[in-house]
Amino acid sequence: MSIEIKTVKTERFSMRYFHFGMGARTMVILPGLSLQSVMDLADAVAESYRSLAEGFTIYLFDRREELPEDYTVYDMGRDTAEAMQALGLRDVSLFGASQGGMMAQVIAIEYPELVHRLVLGSTSSHVLPEQYAVIEEWIRLAEAKDAVGLCLDFGRRIYPPAVFEQVRGALADAGKAATGEELRRFVILARAIRGFSVVDRLDQIRCPVLAIGDAGDEVLDADATMEIAEKLDYRPDFRLYLYTGFGHAAFDTAPDYRRRILDFYKD
């Protein structure tokens, strides 16, 4: 399999994306913060979401190519919504992981016509200073151009210990291959999270919501998922699931994660 990377262009920016699957329904994935673009992993993503590709045509969006220095998560969500509109996507099953989940909340709140169902993975509606502390350390490492240190600390924080040990070498290699431009973009995208909050606007989300987290999340903490639950659990169309032992990256490490997404989309 070789997934084609495409570019959608609007009057303000360009954004890379890819899609796979042949289903009649549309799913959109918004990935989390990373040093290297997920566009480089298109084939692996398609393989991992194979179980959903039978019923969905699945789109995955990168961040915009022209990054302003003062970019925010709100801007990311609005730009992605604009890219979706440019491609004629609406009424989609939206899945956002970590920072992508923050973007997904912005889209569901401000562009309700675009979202049919919403899955929020390991994310937050309100990034507190103590939650941002991990990200500040990543920014420090990136600004010091310590890409290997950044990749290793990133992996140590998002994966359970056993998984981290398995991928430690690959993470170090990724750091060695990182470019100065990738580090620059990472700093902008990481800073964009500071002060993010839509917690007082969650009741504006009209579609059904599933929030999935892990009790041992070392990046945003399980309290971030629980805060979303506290705001939405009065609704009969809200679902919550907390893992134990799969870490912040439960969306990659939990073997039944995609089945839970699919079951929710089928409800």
Image: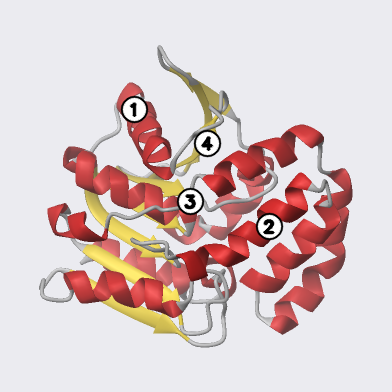
Asked which secondary structure carries label 4, the reply is strand
Q: Residues within 10 Å of mark 2 (few under 14, many from 20)?
A: many
Q: Please indicate whether residue 83 sits to the left or right of residue 33 in the image.
A: left
Residue mark closest to the camera, 4 vs 3:
3
Residue mark closest to the camera, 4 vs 2:
2
Q: Amino acid at mark 1?
A: Glu
* Residue 250 rendering spot, x and y as whole percentages: 53, 72
Q: Is residue 42 visible?
A: yes
Q: CA distance from mark 1 to mark 4?
A: 12 Å
Asked which secondary structure carries label 1, the reply is helix
Residue mark closest to the camera, 1 vs 3:
3
Q: Residue furthest front?
A: 129
Q: Amino acid at mark 3?
A: Ile
State the residue position of label 3.
193
The label on residue 63 is 4
Tell me whether the residue at label 1 lies in contact with that at label 4, contact meaning CB atoms closer than 8 angstroms: no
Asked which secondary structure carries label 3, the reply is loop
Please tell me whether residue 164 is drawn above or below residue 143 in the rendered image: below
Choose top left, top right, bottom left or bottom right for residue 160.
bottom right
Q: Residue at x 60, y 59 (%)?
A: 135
Q: Residue furthest top?
A: 11
State the residue position of label 2.
138
Q: CA distance from mark 4 to mark 2?
A: 18 Å
Looking at the rendered image, the quarter that the N terminus falls into is top right
Q: CA distance from mark 4 to mark 3?
A: 14 Å
The label on residue 117 is none
Q: Earlier in the sequence, mark 1 or mark 3?
A: 1
Q: Earlier in the sequence, mark 1 or mark 2?
A: 1
Residue mark closest to the camera, 1 vs 2:
2
Q: Residues within 10 Å of mark 3 (few under 14, many from 20)?
A: many
